[in-house]
Image (spheres, rainbow, N blue to C red):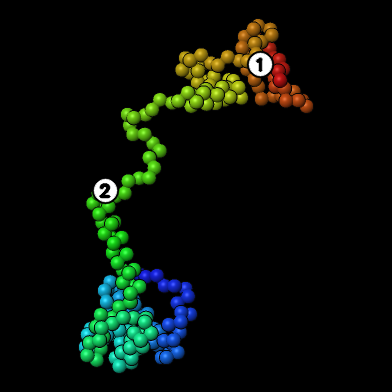
Amino acid sequence: MKYFDHDTTASSDDLILALRIAHGGAAVDCYWAILEQIYRDEAPTVIVRNRPETQALCARLATAYETVREYVTTMIEYGLLDAVEDGDGYAEVVSERAMNNIRDYQEMCERNRLNGQKGGRKPKRKPSGNRAGTEREPSGGEKKRKEKKALGSYEKNPNAGAERGADTGEPAPRSAHPCPECGADMRPTATTQAGTRRRYWRCDECGGEAIYG
């Protein structure tokens, strides 16, 4: 494991405080260094004079083996660690909580590995888009909403698309008002009557104009 949970109240834990009182802050540093080693290797460690793990621990702490062994003895007495005595040292130095966390982590890794072999987890929601060739027909409500939207767009600008119609040969949308002079369709202009919102409409056939609200 590359990291492990560290309680924000660990520094005020009764057993940690007791260890600090007995040997000072160096013993607490030693405790966390041993935990890091257990989590890193995902296995119990050893505190034995000539073992590489113990020598590396003493080097990191810049502390003699005898002092480290004394710290660990107190940790075992206080219940911070469990160990099996081995001559002048300790074999199978372990934290029960650490091993439980390591087992949970290993089980999670195994589940992820098996899920990967099966192609991963199934998506919780269906994709928003349809695959090609599987488009569905719009429902009645969707058709009505589209028709209402198109009608509203035409009412706001009834001559929209007239140029396109002229270019493509399609009939342009009819005006809402016929010319009072010749009866041809009129188109709205951008000019409004002063002081009102009534718009001037112009006939392209005879040039006549009229005002409509």
What is the three-letter code of the residue carrying label 2? Gly
Q: Secondary structure at mark 1?
A: strand
Tags 2 and 1 touching, CB below 8 Å: no
Tell me: residue 90, above or below residue 40.
Answer: below
The answer to whether residue 152 is left or right of residue 14 is right
Give x and y (percent) for residue 104.
Answer: 32, 64
| Quadrant the C terminus occupies | top right
Q: In which image quadrant can residue 174 be found? A: top right
Residue 42 seen in render? yes
Give x and y (percent) for residue 205.
Answer: 62, 10
In the foreground, 182 or 33: 33
- Whole-angstrom CA distance, mark 2 to mark 1, is 68 Å
Please name the residue shown 31% across and 72% down the image: 99
Residue denoted by label 2: 119
Tell me: residue 15, above or below residue 138.
Answer: below
**Label located before the other in sequence (2 or 1):** 2
Tell me: residue 67, above or below residue 45.
Answer: below
Give x and y (percent) for residue 197.
Answer: 72, 25
Residue denoted by label 1: 202
Residue 46 seen in render? no
Outermost residue to the right: 195
